[in-house]
Amino acid sequence: MVRHNSFFTSAAFILIFKEIMKKKNGKKAAATQVQTHQMGATVTPKGVSFRVWAPHAQSVFVTGDFNDWKPYETSMVPEDGGCWAVHVDTAKSGHEYKYVIVNGEQHLYRNDPYARAVTHSVGNSVVYDTSAFEWANDDAFVMPPHNELVIYEMHVGTFHKKKDASTGTFLTAIERLDWLKWLGINAVEVMPPFEFAGDLSWGYNPAHPFAIETAYGGPDAFKTFVKACHKRGIAVILDVVYNHFGPSDLDLWQFDGWSENGKGGIYFYNDWRSETPWGDTRPDYGRPEVRRYLIENALMWLSEYRCDGLRMDMVPYIRNVHADGNAGNDLEAGYNVIREMNEAVQHHFPNKITIAEDMHTMPQITDGVENGGFGYSAQWDAQFVHPMQGILKAADDEHRDMLALERALHFRYGNDVFNRIIYTESHDEVANGKARIVEDIAPGQNGNNYYAEKRALLGLATVLTAPGIPMLFQGQAILEDSWFQDTDPIDWYKAKDNHKFALSVRDLIRLRLNLGNNSKGLTSQYSDTLFLDNEDKVVAFHRYENVHGEAAGSVVVVMNFKHTAYEQYRILFPEAGRWKLLFDSSWEGYSDYNDDIDAIHTVAASTSEGMAGEVNIPAYGVLIYARAQNS
């Protein structure tokens, strides 16, 4: 068996064992004092080492399958810094266990904060051998560069649920990966899969931050999923939650029996700084042990699970108690843990991506730590999604603001257009009373509506051609309707019913990735508005590379946000010559709604207005042109 050594076990921590054999009535589990930097349960060639932080405990024991669950038989030895450790020769992978923490009259049964697996959210911890999974040839996978990423946000529980099953799993999700590959997706962003209360959740209530949700299949199922994605050329970005834990089924709460003000104890703030919209469970970023807990968690997913990046949920609540911009509510320790985490990722995994959900349009989020920034690779862009939602959902064409569209197209953070994630739908935009775009436009029609389909494609075309890293939400490419709920799985019959729409999205993604070698400008840093008419609701923009001061790989995108077709409509082009039509949203292969207008190739020539060419633009249409070769 090929054994993969994780970053932590092979490089970051040194295990030093001093064997002190203890026996009681000939039946007591063999225990060894252990001095180690490895937290949690670590499988060794001769048993399992346990280590836990409980600084206020008077004594700590570990109990489980290996000692017939006798609570006070296997005592742990105190170490510096409030940690307790022991090596148990008779423990092995798969054994269930808990810690018994004694603090005065309190005798507390606690799950391991570092448990890689649990039986369920209120069950037992499970010893998990982190080096046993067979990765085979997964090392050959290389994540695409950021300017070539196309992300698909996925909720495992609803992405592909089998009939009569309570929830989808990582293994059932694998069955739909070939469809994602066909679509052109090369990165999936997995909503939080950490053990949470019950079997159904969005995932933003992690009870056991180091454990993969049992209902989703546990740690090996997630690794199998990552391996399957990599085999298909798909990167895996994991959505992590560090702004709060729980709040329910949370053994971290008052973990070793100590707390102040009725708050959460050693893992949490114990004053006004604990407050979040999800409960008083904000981690205490000022405690070195908690910072370590968070940073080790982040690095574990990139190392042991071979994820290709992290998306961090609601960063404003890490850096500010109320996320309100009031300096008096700032958490300097939160700022520091973000910087430390991103620096650690960049040092050990320089090719992987970290994404912030901040939504406050702060360039510091993606500025380098060395320049006083937070060091994220990219951030979700409120300057794109919010204007686009308004433009697409406006009931009347006259209310679609092309100037707002122009600002959304060209907004950037710093000097890199790929510092932002652009999208029109996400789990936040299509839930909690907010429906998907097609449902908002045509309620109750299951996406089968001319206006809904056309404007939904306009939105996706903008996402896939504008500067930035594009992201789709699950089901968006097959016109999934209604709103996102953890009880409502994707209707995969729509992949067949709406296959023409899906084909149009596929072809847009192919252009976005320059798979035909004729649209390289869509992967570039540069964009300009060529034409804008706020009355006709027509916009044309230019994507190109800047090579020696010249525009190379030029792509021109023409969009019509009005229910009016235009023939022989003159727009500006960046240079004279023949421009080849690469994409026409009104082609009958993309839609059953025929606009009765033929889009055409065009020739741009010098006019008093500049280089101009005539085009036929369908109602609510998208045309994409590239400079024809040898012309």
Image (cartoon, rainbow, N blue to C red):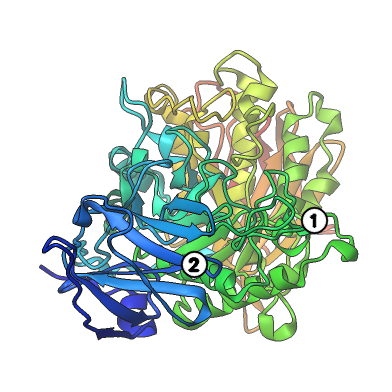
Residue 126 against residue 498 in the figure, above or below: below
Q: Quadrant of residue 306?
A: bottom left
Question: Considering the numbered disc 1 on the image, is that residue within a helix, a strand or a loop?
Answer: helix
Q: In this rendering, does residue 474 appear at all?
A: yes
Q: Is residue 71 left or right of residue 103?
A: left
Q: Amino acid at mark 2?
A: Gln
Q: Spot the residue most to the front.
A: 25
Q: Nearer the viewer, residue 403 or 181?
A: 181
Q: In this rendering, does residue 629 appear at all?
A: no
Name the spot of residue 285 as percent of width and height, x first. Answer: 66, 68
Number of numbered callouts drawn? 2
Pointer 2 local density, CA inside 10 Å: few below 14, some 14–19, many at least 20: few
Identify the residue position indicated by label 2 in the image: 58
Label annotation for residue 272: 1
Q: Quadrant of residue 495?
A: top left
Question: Considering the numbered disc 2 on the image, is that residue within a helix, a strand or a loop?
Answer: loop
Q: Nearer the viewer, residue 128 or 48?
A: 48
- Quadrant of the image for the C terminus? bottom right
Mark positioned earlier in the residue sequence (1 or 2): 2
Name the spot of residue 66 as percent of width and height, x first. Answer: 20, 57
Residue 226 against residue 500 in the figure, above or below: below
Q: Nearer the viewer, mark 1 or mark 2?
A: 2
Residue 147 against residue 20 in the figure, above or below: above
- What residue do we see at 36% from left, 34% from top? 168
Q: CA distance from mark 1 to mark 2?
A: 28 Å
- What residue do we see at 11% from left, 64% from top? 26
Name the spot of residue 23 as percent of width and height, x first. Answer: 17, 69
Name the spot of residue 389 as percent of width and height, x first. Answer: 73, 38
Q: Quadrant of residue 127?
A: bottom left
